[in-house]
Image: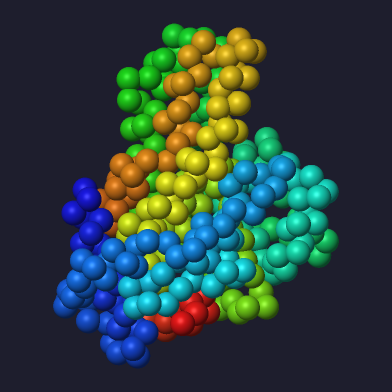
Amino acid sequence: MPRARSRLGLATGAVVTALALGCPPASAVPLEVTPTAVAAAAVPQGDAIRQIPLQGAVNVRDMGGYRTYDGKETRYGQVYRADALSKLTDADVAALGRLGLAKVVDFRVAPEVQYDGPDRLPPGLAATSRPVTDNGLFARLLTAIGSADPVRQEEMLGGGRAAAFMRDVYRTFVTSPENRARFAETLRDLAHSDRRSPALYHCTSGKDRTGWTSYLLLRALGVPSRTAEQDYLASNTYRAAHDARVRAGLKQSGLMQNPDLLIPLQEVRLDYLDAALERVEAEYGGLYGYLTRGLGLDHRTLAALRAALLRP
């Protein structure tokens, strides 16, 4: 699938570059990019991945600092991605307040919100509920862990079943009309934002639904696929210590003899991303087709996205 990711990246780069030049998108014409130019654009400039350190959330990041094919850079302080904000401390809420957020989008489904609680946000800011199905992942986790039965847990999660389940989750990001509508609404919000109205979107772990949204956003802005993948995979770094503590706690409590069964559910992996991109290729012929026909984002919206979120 790496070749498919490359084809998708070049097609999207051609479209956004054409939009930036004010031309009709020549989607049928491949973008000519030299290997040197791609390599230079793919390397994050400076502190490209900027974590927002909080006590009650571990995967909160500023989406600024990424270079595009045409030499622009995503703005800092404009768009943030995060995991659940329900466990924030008072100090965390104050820190979030200093970001000046105007909109928070919550991708969690109702059972997740009921279990973890609603977002804790600065005064005057309310989350917009925009649930993207997790394909039953949350319920599956609760069932497996709650059974405290190692045989049943192995049957549900072992033998590659957990990873296969995650690939199915990612496919629904492309195949589900409801999911596509949620992603489209969020990207439209970002396209119509300005520097006085930063936005944040999140799910429970900030890695799958949030990761796919971030990948789409970066690709739509003309950021090379290698860089967008680095942002996607960074969730493994930021979540590693927290997720390891969760596994250790489950073993210590006796709920799981083999908590490593959860690792495929806790991690992000390129083959999960590839599962979604394969559906994009099969159903829409590429990422540009998914953005325009699947999500219904017209050329004006894609151009507005670049105008709002890129700086020279």
Q: Residue at x 55, y 27 (%)?
A: 244
**Residue 59, image x and y in percent?**
58, 47
Asked whether 88 or 72 is in front, the reply is 72
- Residue 69 higher or lower than 206, as above or below: below
Does 280 sit left or right of 180 as displayed?
Answer: left
Residue placed furthest toward the front: 46
Instruction: Please name the residue shown 76% across and 57% down the image.
Output: 95
Query: Position of 31 compared to 59: left or right?
Result: left
Question: Position of 201 compared to 56: left or right?
Answer: left
Q: Is residue 147 visible?
A: no
Residue 56: percent from the left, percent from the top?
71, 42
Of residues 150 and 185, the one drawn nearer to the viewer in this rendering: 150
User: In the rendered image of this protein, does residue 154 appear above or below residue 7?
Assistant: above
Q: Residue 190's spot in the image, x, y percent?
A: 54, 71
Number of marks in the image? 0
Residue ID at (28%, 87%): 24
Q: Residue at x 24, y 68 (%)?
A: 36
Q: Is residue 61 visible?
A: yes
Q: Position of residue 262 (x, y in %)?
A: 47, 26
Q: Name the colouring of the figure.
A: rainbow
Which quadrant of the view contains residue 11? bottom left
Q: In this orientation, which residue lies closer to the viewer: 133 or 27?
A: 27
- Residue located farthest toward the bottom when viewing the structure as drawn: 22
